[in-house]
Structure formats: structure tokens, C-alpha cells
Amino acid sequence: MKSLYLLLDLATIFFPLILSFDKKVAYVKQWKFVFLAGLVVGIPFLIWDYYFTKTAVWGFNPDYLTGVYIANLPIEEVLFFVVVPFSCVFIYACVKAYFAKINFQKFNILFYILIFAYIFFIAIFGYYGAYAQYVIGSSLLTLLVIWFLRKQLHFLPIAFMISIIPFMLVNGVLTGGFTDAPIVWYDDLERTPFRIFTIPAEDVLYSFTLLGLNVGVFELVKAKFKKENEL
């Protein structure tokens, strides 16, 4: 099915898009901050993606692609870095709006400890692969940044845990959990030997980095905009 990856992109953004007009969350009013954060974070991720595709750390199955490419990346992969951050920040915005009165401080500390432990696990047992090395470095840096911004990002950990559900579904499709062959394939020598179903274990940290940086930049941009408008 040539349009499968494209349909997956559209399905990912469908509900966050139509629910953006919910009055309590008012996500539509935050779109400019979401897209600016997505641009800032998306560029280095696309460079990373370009390099790993060029060096065959991972690649894409043409059987599930429309055939439109930007450089060596399928258009569907480029759109991935639009729809996934948009949808993940939407989850964060919903958590922030609907769970505003809940104190997640103890949960957050446990979350950060577990994320660090997961990074340590990958570093000990899967450090030899290029994907593992990059994800260890990027997720550790992200964790340090988020730790220093933890008060401003109080709702990030619970939002990430909620986002794991759609993450598993989308990534499960991409890695061949529901198809005869994966849409995205990995060189087994460049990653850890561990998988969660069909999903490389590193992808959890990749998702954490993508969501964490997008939410972090989103909040910083919003705060800067608010400060400038108060002057």
C-alpha cells in the first residue's frame, strides 16, 4: 500500500487538529508557538535523519511510500516531524489544562530517575551501535535541560507517559508490527539487540527527546512572547 505512511501521518494529526478548538485547552491559539518550536527542534532531527538514512543506519520501504522525496527523505518522513510534535504538544497542553490542580512532583522525580536508568541501561548494553550512541547522548542532554526547567515543565512527565500509548501504535506500524514488512527498517548492527515488540528499545528515548525538546522550546517561546507583550 503505497500511501500507508502518509495515511499514518494523517491519522496521527487528525484528532489533535479537530480538537484544537476545545475551549478549555484552546490549542488553536497556541499553534504559532507549537510550529515555531517544531521548526527549531525539527531541523536538527531532520539533519540526524538525513545522515542516518545516507549511511544506512535506517531506511524506508518504498512499498509503503508515495515516492515523493526531499533530498534522501520520503515526504512522509519529513511530515512525521510536523505531525508528531504537533500531536505530542497537544497531549501536553491537554494535561496542563485538565490536570492543572494536581501536583505531580513525586511522580516527576520517579519519572526522571527511571528515564536516567533507561539511558544507563542502553549505554551499558547497547552502546556499540551508532543509533544507540546518538540516542544516549541526545536523551541525556535533554534530560539535563528538562531537569533544570522541571518547574516550568511540571506536566511533561505525565504527558510523555500518556503519549507512550499512541507512540507504541504509530511506531508499531512503522516497524512492521502490523504489516508484512516494516515501513522503517534498521541496521541491526547500529542499534541495541533489544526491542519492545517490533520497536527498537532506543525509540523510547528518541521519543522522549523529541517530545521533551518540543515542549521545552514551546514553553520558552510562550514565556518570551508573554513577557514582551507585558512591557
Image (cartoon, rainbow, N blue to C red):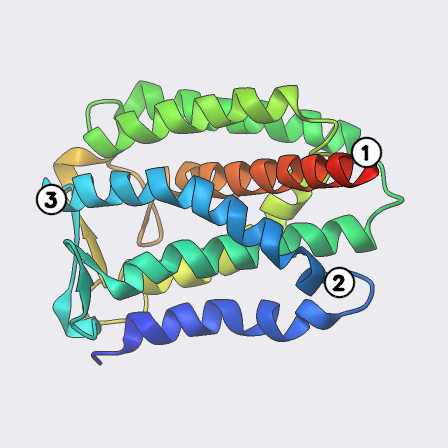
Question: Is residue 221 in view?
Answer: yes
**Residue carrying label 1:** 231
The tag on residue 33 is none
Name the amino acid type tagged 1.
Leu
Q: Is disc 1 surrounded by few (<14), some (14 to 19) or many (20+) residues within 10 Å? A: few
From the image, state whether disc 2 or disc 3 is nearer to you: 2
**Residue carrying label 2:** 26
Q: Is disc 2 surrounded by few (<14), some (14 to 19) or many (20+) residues within 10 Å? A: some
220 is higher (above) or lower (below) than 62: above
Q: CA distance from mark 1 to mark 3?
A: 48 Å
From the image, state whether disc 2 or disc 1 is nearer to you: 1
Residue 30: image location, x then y, percent: 67, 55
Q: Which residue: 25% across, 44% down?
A: 49
- The earlier-in-sequence mark between 1 and 3 is 3
Q: Is disc 3 surrounded by few (<14), some (14 to 19) or many (20+) residues within 10 Å? A: some
- The earlier-in-sequence mark between 2 and 3 is 2
Residue 139 figure quarter: top left
**Residue carrying label 3:** 54
67 is higher (above) or lower (below) than 69: below
- The earlier-in-sequence mark between 2 and 1 is 2
Name the amino acid type tagged 2.
Ala
